[in-house]
């Protein structure tokens, strides 16, 4: 009888442990200000967007649950390395500098920077040189800040904490133009959130890269699971449906 009771207790313990192990929660750092990649949905008070849908779909394939943690873009890598979050799923380019600190999944989506100016400014700016001597802006922590500064074309490159701050200053005429993720700018212009802004269609991006899911370098097993899940949603067409849902154009081939 004693052995029978021990066996029943052991089986019950395994039964309780099984589902918990199968649905390990992974803390995902995402930003509230990167629509359509990530943004705060004020109706539900949750972070939504392309990269939330992607990591959720990948997690389903890889066997883990997703817990979204809202963070400012510039704090994501520090939060990851400090183990406050487990992965980053936001509009973050895979760059050599970032790869010195963290690891990335296979690419999710590729694009370049876009340029916004006041709607009243109808000039077809095609390059940095077309804005020579002007004051422009970019968001801190993005891959666009250093190329803008190193170009030597601008009177000043103002660096902003958030995308909305950046767009507000162009909208108010405080700076001539701003450079940021082209899909993010296009989505905001389409929404009409900043009615005085225009996305410059003639502009040719300088920094073309790929967004990936960020991980700590030592978390190789998790990276393998994420890459496998990402491959599945690419093959099934689910990734294409997610991109279409959020109005993203076909990916630009990174140079």
Image: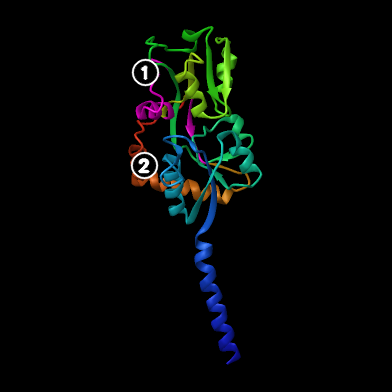
Question: Could you classify mark 2 by the number of other residues whose Cα lies within 10 Å: few (under 14), some (14-19), or many (20 or more)?
Answer: some
Q: Nearer the viewer, residue 74 or 254?
A: 74
Say left or right for 54 vs 82: left
Q: Identify the residue at image location x=49%, y=55%.
A: 64
Q: Identify the residue at image location x=34%, y=44%.
A: 237
Quadrant where the image shows the N terminus: bottom right
Say left or right for 31 vs 201: right
Quarter where residue 43 is shown: top left
CA–CA distance in space, label 2 to label 1: 24 Å
Residue 8 is labelled as none
Q: Nearer the viewer, residue 93 or 217?
A: 93
State which region is magenta: 184-213
Q: Nearer the viewer, residue 147 or 28?
A: 28
x, y (%) of residue 76?
58, 38
Considering the numbered disc 1 on the image, is that residue within a helix, a strand or a loop?
A: loop
Can the viewer see residue 111?
yes
x, y (%) of residue 213?
51, 41
Disc on the earlier residue, 2 or 1: 1
Numbered circles on residues, count: 2
- Quickly name the residue at label 1: 201
Vertical arrangement, residue 63 with respect to residue 207, above or below: below
Vertical arrangement, residue 227 with respect to residue 191, above or below: below
- Quickly name the residue at label 2: 242
Question: Could you classify mark 1 by the number of other residues whose Cα lies within 10 Å: few (under 14), some (14-19), or many (20 or more)?
Answer: few
In magenta stretch: residue 58: no
In magenta stretch: residue 186: yes
**Of all residues shown, which one is farthest toward the bottom?**
1
x, y (%) of residue 255?
47, 24
Quarter where residue 203 is shown: top left
Vertical arrangement, residue 200 with respect to residue 26, above or below: above
């Amino acid at each position: 009888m004693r052995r029978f009771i021990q066996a029943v207790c052991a089986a019950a313990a395994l039964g309780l442990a099984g589902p918990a192990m199968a649905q390990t929660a992974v803390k995902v750092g995402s930003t509230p200000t990167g629509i359509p990649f990530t943004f705060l949905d004020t109706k539900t008070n949750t972070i939504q967007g392309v990269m939330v849908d992607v990591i959720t779909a990948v997690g389903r394939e890889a066997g883990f649950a997703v817990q979204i943690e809202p963070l400012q873009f510039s704090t994501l890598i520090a939060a990851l390395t400090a183990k406050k979050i487990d992965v980053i799923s936001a509009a973050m380019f895979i760059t050599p500098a970032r790869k010195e600190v963290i690891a990335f999944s296979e690419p999710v989506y590729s694009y370049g920077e876009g340029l916004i100016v006041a709607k009243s400014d109808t000039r077809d700016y095609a390059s940095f040189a077309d804005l020579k001597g002007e004051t422009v802006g970019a968001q801190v922590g993005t891959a666009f800040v250093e190329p803008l500064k190193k170009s030597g074309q601008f009177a000043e490159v103002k660096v902003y904490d958030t995308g909305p701050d950046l767009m507000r200053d162009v909208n108010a005429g405080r700076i001539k133009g701003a450079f940021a993720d082209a899909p993010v700018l296009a989505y905001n212009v389409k929404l009409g959130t900043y009615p005085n802004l225009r996305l410059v269609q003639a502009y040719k991006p300088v920094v073309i890269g790929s967004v990936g899911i960020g991980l700590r370098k030592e978390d190789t097993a998790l990276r393998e699971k994420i890459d496998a899940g990402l491959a599945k949603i690419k093959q099934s067409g689910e990734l294409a449906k997610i991109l279409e849902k959020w109005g993203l154009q076909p990916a630009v081939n990174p140079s």
